[in-house]
Image (cartoon, rainbow, N blue to C red):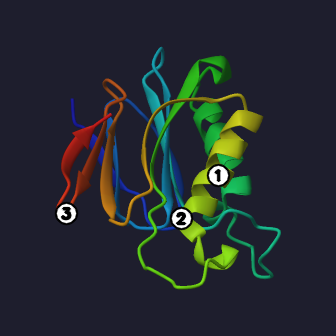
Amino acid sequence: MTVCITKIGIAEVRAERDPAVLVTLGLGSCVGVCLYDRSKKIIGMAHIMLPSSIEIKNNSNKAKFADTAIEMLIDEMLELGANRSLITAKIAGGAQMFNFKSANDLMRIGERNIEAVKRELKRHRVKIVAQDVGGNYGRTIEFYSENGMLSVKTIGHGIRVI
């Protein structure tokens, strides 16, 4: 069987059936949200750039924001046959890539993204089963439909499987 490897760009969501691998490169302050239905082996990934669509005037790309992308991703998975009550989440990213002297809330984008993602997953009753978030380094992630494994690759911090 041929494995479908799909790259997820910034502000994109995608769901796939097994066999599939979803990959996103260079998560800095962005958060990669990976959803999995173990029973159907359906996976989904969102590369979330910002916490809220409400704060942004040009918010036509709903995949860009935590408050809209997660719902889109769940809907895509349901269309493929996922069971909503069996979907779990793994998240990665949300780094503070630059040191700012000001503690201005706008400069805490990674932390704000993590908070927004967790809030939205809770609102949709999706349990977070693993996470690799925060820090001051970027991540590349690969998500596997066969077993729900999330590989988190970093420069200087190695590879972590969650």
User: Residue 113: x and y, percent?
Assistant: 60, 59
Label 1 packing within 10 angstroms: few (<14), some (14-19), many (20+): some
How far apart are the two marked residues, 2 and 3, measured between alpha carbons?
18 Å
Judge from the rendering whether residue 7 lies leftward or rightward of residue 156; answer left or right.
Answer: right
Q: Which mark is residue 115?
A: 1
* Comes first in the chain, label 2 or label 1: 2
How far apart are the two marked residues, 2 and 1, measured between alpha carbons?
9 Å
- Amino acid at circle 1: Glu
Judge from the rendering whether residue 15 lies leftward or rightward of residue 127; answer left or right.
Answer: left
User: Residue 78: x and y, percent?
Assistant: 64, 31
Against 35, is 133 above or below?
A: below
Total numbered badges shown on the rendered structure? 3
CB within 8 Å, label 2 to label 3: no
Question: Mark 3: which secondary structure?
Answer: loop
Q: Would residue 23 be visible to someone looking at this image?
A: yes
Label 3 packing within 10 angstroms: few (<14), some (14-19), many (20+): few
Q: Which mark is residue 155?
A: 3
Provide the residue designation for mark 2. Answer: 110
Question: Mark 1: which secondary structure?
Answer: helix
How far apart are the two marked residues, 1 and 3, measured between alpha carbons?
24 Å
- Amino acid at circle 3: Ile
Q: Would residue 49 be visible to someone looking at this image?
A: no
Residue depicted at x 76% and y 67%:
53
Residue depicted at x 62% and y 20%:
83
